[in-house]
Amino acid sequence: MSQAPSATRGFGARLASDSFVYGLGGMANQAVAIVLVPIYARQLGTNGVGIAGVLNSTISLSLMFVGLALPQAFFRWYLREATTARDRAWVLSTTLGVRLAASLAGFALILAASIPITQALYGGEHLLVFALAAPIVLFDSFNGIPLSFLRAERKPRDYIAISISRAVLGTVLILSFVVAARMGVVGVALGGAIAAGVSAVIGTWALARAGLLRVTLDWPLTRAMLGFAMPLVPAAMAGWVLNLADRPLLQAMTGDQGLVGVYTMGYTAGLVINALAIQPFTLAWSAAYWEVSRRDDAARTFARALTWFLAIAAGAALFLSGLGTDALRLLVGPTFEESRYIVPFSAFAYVLYGAYTVGASGLSVVGRSGKVASTMAIAAAATLILNLVLIPIMGMYGAAAATVAGYLLLAIIAGVVSQRYYPVEWELGRAVSILAIAVGLSAAALLGPDHAIWRIACVLAYVPILLGLGIVKISQGRTLLSALRR
């Protein structure tokens, strides 16, 4: 029987280390998506890329419904409420029972829903592609509990082995089916389904090896866990609206698979900044701000952290936006030429999400995390409305603008609400100036002379402008690093 995890290291060090390791799984999946971009482009064309984008959005939404936010409830009862190894085993077996029932129900519902979905979006075509979403959701949903168990027991090696093997196997299978077998988008879905199934088998084996592969249904415990978890589902769905709803909406409102493909390609290229900069920062910050909050100068450090995060992240977004044109032309060819104009929208949307994580930190510090969900819901509703209004007028640029506006609104609302409970003297003038300069240079790089030298010049001008105008100062950066080290 497994034992409760013990604190053998300092809490901050352990949290930072675990956050990084567990985050590698998510980053691995994003890295796979980025690596597959040029292959999708050349093998599937704009129509196929568009279908794959809608498929991924559908799978993500389905996992949120079927998942029922059970991992959060599992962590609470497993790590806090359970006091003995027997209690923890009972919590795990009950969670497995609930998740298995939900996963099987989700499998049946998604399989049945694939008919009306394909009818509404594609006139009945691509039914097999969307039907294969059902086993992907079934296996990935169920495997969420073994992965949560490994996190609770702090077994990062096993966790990362399962996560990365899922990503690697999926990549190999998709390449085999799409490139070698020339199965098109069906190959993408089939490769994902097989990889999800193998990963679920490995997760099940991890539980069996620990002697904890048992399925039960404790109704009082089930009701308590679902009562805790279900209110978290709308917040997850709000995140989906902000990040993924644009592709199905674009397909439904325009009926142009090629347009959705071009948009998906540009948005995925912007994902690079999330994988390499934003997600690693949010993982590190999620541990660091708790330590910083105990210091007398915490509010000042929070403000400086936001300024310097924006300076670095906006610079990365400018780099990606400016040189994305040449990268896309080299990797995906002229068919996706217009995708380059979507990259800045995607890149700066992720920058704004990073700003939101810093701005909302105060809410967590004072125990007002429930306000975070409400701000997410407001921003998601605004994004949905903007999509419905702007897509008929501006097409894919309307969807891109709605996404950026949603994340901007999220950052602003979170910052304003947080000020009520945890006041911080944010360096708003510097923050706005940084974003304005980075966005302006990105626009100049894309809309100016179509020459690589011009785009490189726009990118290189960023740092001298910030330093020359005194918007950021090296001495302030040293002070911030010193505070974070302490």
Image (cartoon, grey):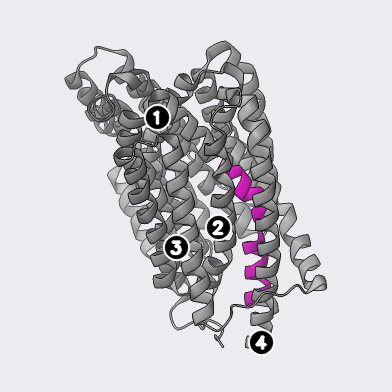
Is residue 284 visible in the rendered image? The answer is no
Q: Which residue is mark 3?
A: 22
Residue most extreme to the left: 453
Q: Quadrant of the C terminus?
A: bottom left
**Residue 229, x across and y down, in percent:** 71, 59
Which residue is identified by label 1?
A: 265
Q: Earlier in the sequence, mark 1 or mark 2?
A: 2
Number of callouts: 4
- In this view, which residue lies farthest toward the front? 181
Q: What is the three-letter code of the residue carrying label 2? A: Phe
Task: Relative to 200, say whether 324 is above or below.
Answer: above
Residue under the point 81% across and 71% down? 219
Q: Which residue is mark 2?
A: 139
**Residue type marked 4:** Arg
Which element carries disc 3, helix, strand or loop?
helix
Question: Which amino acid is tagged 3?
Answer: Tyr
> Magenta stretch?
59-79
| N-terminal-most mark, 3 or 4 | 3
In which quarter of the view is residue 252 placed?
A: top right
Horizontal placement of 276 versus 378: left or right?
left
N-terminal of the pair, mark 3 or mark 2, is 3
